[in-house]
Image (spheres, helix red, strand yellow):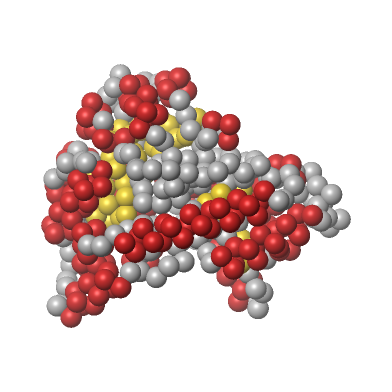
């Protein structure tokens, strides 16, 4: 019998990918499944970005790339950060990776030793906690609620910090809640971080452009703690480039060099053609991105109206990203006569098997009372999906 590493027992398979896989299996058997689980824009990559990729192929950009990314791309990232965020970075502070997930992995493996603590507000993206476990660190959750718009305050942050705290990890806009921290809210948290210069703040800003409440504010924009911040961003969400697999970090040079060293032993440099396309994405017309966000805004209003008509669901209004994260705990303990719902996992599976709609249980995000539903799907699919959900939930007594 093959003996496997104990590493595999330390972390779980991402529930987002697991539910997508189950949905694909049903679909392969002829079932009409509506996907409200994956965080992937249903838009095609804009033409000017694809054209840049074709040009790169024709110009033979087909060789190994530098581990931290082409200099031109790292310069493009710096241009974007200055243009959109008012942040001054040098190319030596940028590391390009095969997706923002690898960027996060590089950071966690570079910053966290065994037993060190990583503070993560709930709800959080499923991979955050698992990466900390891979690094043998300890996850310290700060619980939030819909009543606080799924955001923490300075008092809660201060209370969570110990002499073992090494990283604070969060996203704004947040996956899965859609929470967006305002400049004033970030400023209040910054005053706490100023007292703890040993803490690195990993700021996941992958949903930066998908924001319904105003201009994005990065926590790196506060000079007093800028050197403590490692920004994670990428091309997947804002540019509909999920399959291109391009992410990046912006951080102080010590952290950037550490991430480059880690990446050098895992994947080396990211895909050459994707990098050339990313230069065009970051430096050229943002109109396709803004049009995509306008459509997401319409869908958000549509979903909120559909959900409001279903008894027992409490749904905060997301300020960013393309998910709703409703509290569905009112259905726990109910049954349709065949299936009894005990938790979010049961309800997600019930909706998959009876309504043929995929979702992701809230436990994976640190919030067992909720389920995440995406609205990165067509209006027709969204309406049909929620009609099915409503019917399935009406059968639970």
The quadrant in which residue 314 appears is top right
x, y percent for residue 38: 51, 59
The residue depicted at 19 percent of the width and 45 percent of the height is: 82
> Is residue 115 at least partly visible in the picture?
no
> Is residue 47 at least partly visible in the picture?
yes
Is 40 placed above or below 313 here?
below
x, y percent for residue 344: 66, 47
Total labels drawn: 0
x, y percent for residue 285: 25, 62
x, y percent for residue 142: 50, 30
The quadrant in which residue 394 appears is bottom right
The residue depicted at 65 percent of the width and 73 percent of the height is: 32
Q: Which residue is most to the right? A: 337
Work out whether residue 365 or residue 55 is closer to the camera in this orientation and state it. Answer: 55
Is 285 placed above or below 364 here?
below
The residue depicted at 60 percent of the width and 76 percent of the height is: 28
Is 96 placed above or below 152 here?
below
The residue depicted at 35 percent of the width and 60 percent of the height is: 289
Q: Which residue is most to the bottom? A: 58
Q: Is residue 345 left or right of residue 109?
A: right
Is 127 placed above or below 155 here?
below
Work out whether residue 21 or residue 295 is closer to the camera in this orientation and state it. Answer: 295
The quadrant in which residue 225 appears is top left
Q: Is residue 138 left or right of residue 146?
A: left
């Amino acid at each position: 019998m093959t003996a496997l590493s104990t590493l595999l027992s330390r972390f779980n398979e991402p529930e987002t990918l697991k539910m997508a896989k189950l949905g694909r299996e049903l679909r392969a058997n002829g079932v009409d499944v509506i996907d409200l689980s994956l965080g992937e824009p249903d838009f095609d990559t804009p033409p000017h970005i694809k054209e840049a990729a074709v040009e790169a192929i024709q110009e033979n950009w087909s060789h190994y790339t530098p581990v931290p990314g082409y200099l031109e791309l790292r310069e493009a990232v710096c241009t974007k950060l200055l243009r959109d965020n008012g942040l001054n970075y040098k190319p030596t502070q940028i590391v390009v990776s095969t997706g923002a997930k690898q960027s996060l992995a590089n950071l966690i493996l570079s910053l966290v030793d065994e037993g060190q603590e990583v503070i993560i507000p709930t709800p959080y993206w499923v991979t955050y906690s698992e990466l900390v476990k891979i690094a043998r660190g300890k996850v310290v959750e700060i619980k939030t609620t819909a009543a606080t718009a799924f955001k923490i305050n300075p008092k809660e942050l201060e209370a969570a910090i110990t002499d073992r705290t090494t990283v604070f990890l969060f996203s704004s806009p947040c996956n899965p809640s859609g929470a967006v921290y305002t400049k004033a809210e970030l400023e209040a948290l910054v005053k706490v971080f100023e007292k703890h210069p040993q803490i690195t703040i990993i700021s996941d800003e992958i949903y930066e452009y998908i924001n319904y409440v105003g201009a994005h504010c990065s926590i790196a924009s506060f000079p007093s703690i800028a050197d403590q911040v490692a920004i994670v961003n990428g091309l997947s969400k804002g540019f509909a480039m999920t399959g291109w697999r391009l992410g990046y970090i912006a951080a102080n040079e010590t952290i950037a060099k550490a991430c480059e060293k880690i990446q050098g032993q895992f994947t080396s440099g990211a895909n050459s053609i994707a990098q050339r396309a990313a230069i065009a994405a970051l430096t050229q017309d943002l109109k396709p991105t803004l049009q995509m966000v306008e459509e997401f805004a319409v869908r958000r209003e549509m979903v909120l109206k559909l959900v409001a008509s279903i008894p027992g669901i409490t749904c905060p209004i997301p300020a960013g990203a393309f998910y709703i994260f409703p509290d569905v705990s009112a259905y726990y303990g109910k049954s349709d006569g065949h299936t009894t719902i005990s938790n979010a996992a049961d309800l997600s599976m019930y909706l998959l098997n009876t309504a043929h709609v995929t979702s992701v249980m809230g436990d994976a995000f640190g919030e067992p009372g909720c389920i995440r539903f995406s609205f990165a799907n067509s209006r027709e699919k969204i309406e049909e999906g929620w009609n099915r959900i409503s019917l399935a939930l009406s059968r639970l007594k």
